[in-house]
Amino acid sequence: MIKLKVEMNQEETKLWNRHFILLLIAHSCAQMGYQILVPSLPVYFQTIGKGEQVIGMLAGLMAVTAILSRPYVGKALDSQNKRNVYITGLFFHLIASGLYVWGESTFILSLLRLLHGFGIGITTAAAATIAADFIPKKRLAEGVGFFSMATVVSMAVTPAVGLYLANQNHYTALFSLAVLFIGAAILFCLCLNQKERDTNLNKKNQQTEVGKKEGRTAVIMACIAFCVTLPYSAIVTFLALYAKQAEISNIEWFFIVYAGIILLARPAAGRLADQKGEAFVVIPSMLMTCLSLLLLSIAETFLSFMTVALFLAMGYGTIQPALQSIVLRRTPASRRGRAMSTFFLGMDISYGIGPLLCGVLVRLYSYSTMFLSSIIFILMGCILYFFYFHLKGRDKNELSV
């Protein structure tokens, strides 16, 4: 009995435990299925005759159902089996990815994007919430950073593969690979054991002043996530087309460099956030993101595009895990589903508005003007973070009194 308790305690304090590893593999496969389509879908849409404004609209449509699903997903994660919620989202993800190859009309593609968004809305919040249950609290920022590496690893290879297949017009192989990755994610997720949660949550505690402050943190972090993600949504949507206009070949290396730098930066950023605080990561990362957008607006050579990938990785690549760890650190386990849904809601809105807004700016002005203008949103994120930092200090003073 004592030996069993010791083993359980070791499992709870160890970052690389069995559940965390299984979930990491499952989420990596799911992200590969998603990332392989992110840069290649705009090329596919252009190949079948869609204009830039329609491409921007289709890219942003996915966020509509992702946004609408967030409140229900958060409630489900806090009251039902999280693994089953996650698998449900993966099935929607799989179905939409497999049907793109048969969609050529704007109407059919719009329906598929809405279905895809519903799946993404479920899986992103579910994966982050489940992961937080398996990460030791003292290593939360580091653990979130490592878990978010699933996206990074997928970005190291799959976008390049997707762009290669799209440029060769091998769209059947492209969408088949996406389905294969998501199917593997479902299989690994089925190996994950997670007990049913107690649905009788303490509603009284959720209405306390502490609960209100926790909810306020999630809302502010969601607003910051919106500001910093909107420029990134423009990059992933229009980068391939921008590079094509500038006659830059092998642009898939942008994603490889971006992912490689993040692999080095995120673990270090996570440890820094755990030891010194998230502010030591968030502010410098925002400044790096501003620099990357400035350089992208004047990029004309392959080397300049790779330099943008370097600064973008050290910037936006480390912001999201830091913001996410702030929310998780200040939210009890019984409310993490709602908190994570609120946080990702900000990113969903940016993915919905960003491509559409930036598509209009490209049509009216140019890619260069669009990327330069998006720096405004990063600066807005900085202002919001300083506002949160002020509120955090005031809350500490109130608690001490």
Image: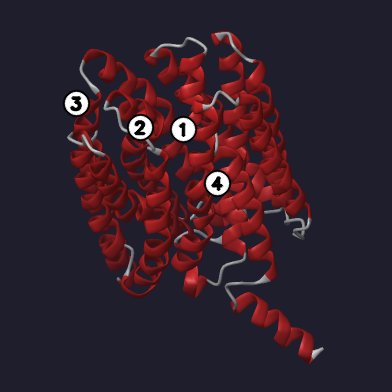
Label 3 CA crowd tier, 10 Å (few <14, some 14–19, many 20+): some
Horizontal side, residue 346 vs residue 301: left or right: right
Task: State how far apart marks 1 and 4 are (Cα).
Answer: 30 Å
Q: Give the label, 4 or 3, closer to the camera.
A: 3
Label 2 CA crowd tier, 10 Å (few <14, some 14–19, many 20+): many
Q: Check disc 4 and report its element: helix, strand or loop.
A: helix
Label 1 close to label 3 by CB (< 8 Å): no
Query: Where does the image place residue 250, in percent across and percent down from the top left?
Result: 39, 38
N-terminal of the pair, mark 2 or mark 1, is 1
Task: State how far apart marks 3 and 2 are (Cα).
Answer: 14 Å
Q: Residue at x 27, y 19 (%)?
A: 362
N-terminal of the pair, mark 1 or mark 3, is 1
Label 1 CA crowd tier, 10 Å (few <14, some 14–19, many 20+): many
Disc number placed over residue 369 in the picture, else none: 3
Badge count: 4
Q: Check disc 2 and report its element: helix, strand or loop.
A: helix
- Residue bearing the label numbered 2: 239
Residue in the foreground of this view, choosing between 84 and 105: 105
Give the amino acid at mark 4: Arg
N-terminal of the pair, mark 3 or mark 2, is 2
N-terminal of the pair, mark 4 or mark 2, is 2
Disc number placed over residue 39 in the picture, else none: 1
N-terminal of the pair, mark 1 or mark 4, is 1
Label 2 close to label 1 by CB (< 8 Å): yes
Q: Check disc 3 and report its element: helix, strand or loop.
A: helix
